[in-house]
Image: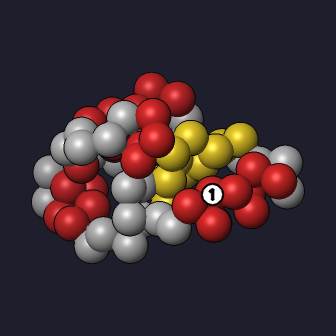
Amino acid sequence: MKFLANENVPFSIITYLKSAGFDIKAIGIDDPSITDKQVIDIAIDENRTIITYDSDYGELIFKHGYKPEAG
């Protein structure tokens, strides 16, 4: 399983998941300050599951139909 950590995910969680062998990309490190739509686009393009504390993703997914296959 591949993950995409949004900017609001603590670095300690990203570090832990990497040390546990998970494939995780961190927006705060790799692509800081991009929009939520751009985060979803990366998740779709790279088949990653988004980890976030941001509730705005619900609106993008349910109202606007942006839905990464991986979740």
Q: Residue furthest right?
A: 20
Say above or below: 23 vs 62.
Answer: above
Which coloring applies here?
secondary structure
- Depth check: give the residue in front, 28 or 21: 28
Residue 42 position in % (x across, y down): 40, 33
Say above or below: 52 vs 34.
Answer: below
71 left or right of 39 in image: right
Say above or below: 5 vs 57.
Answer: above
Residue 63 position in % (x across, y down): 14, 60
Label 1: how many Cα within 10 Å (few below 14, some 14–19, many 20+): many
Q: Which residue lies at the image location 38% right of the left edge and 55% below the top edge?
A: 7
- Depth check: give the residue in front, 60 or 7: 7
Mark 1 sits on what residue?
14
6 left or right of 21 in image: left
Q: Which residue lies at the image location 15% right of the left edge and 51% below the top edge?
A: 64
Q: Which residue lies at the image location 41% right of the left edge and 47% below the top edge?
A: 28
Residue 39 position in % (x across, y down): 33, 42
- Depth check: give the residue in front, 16 or 22: 16
Badge 1 marks a residue whose secondary structure is: helix
Kind of residue sitting beneath label 1:
Ile
Q: Which residue lies at the image location 41% right of the left edge and 55% below the top edge?
A: 6
**Can I make out residue 69 in this image?**
no
Residue 66 position in % (x across, y down): 27, 45
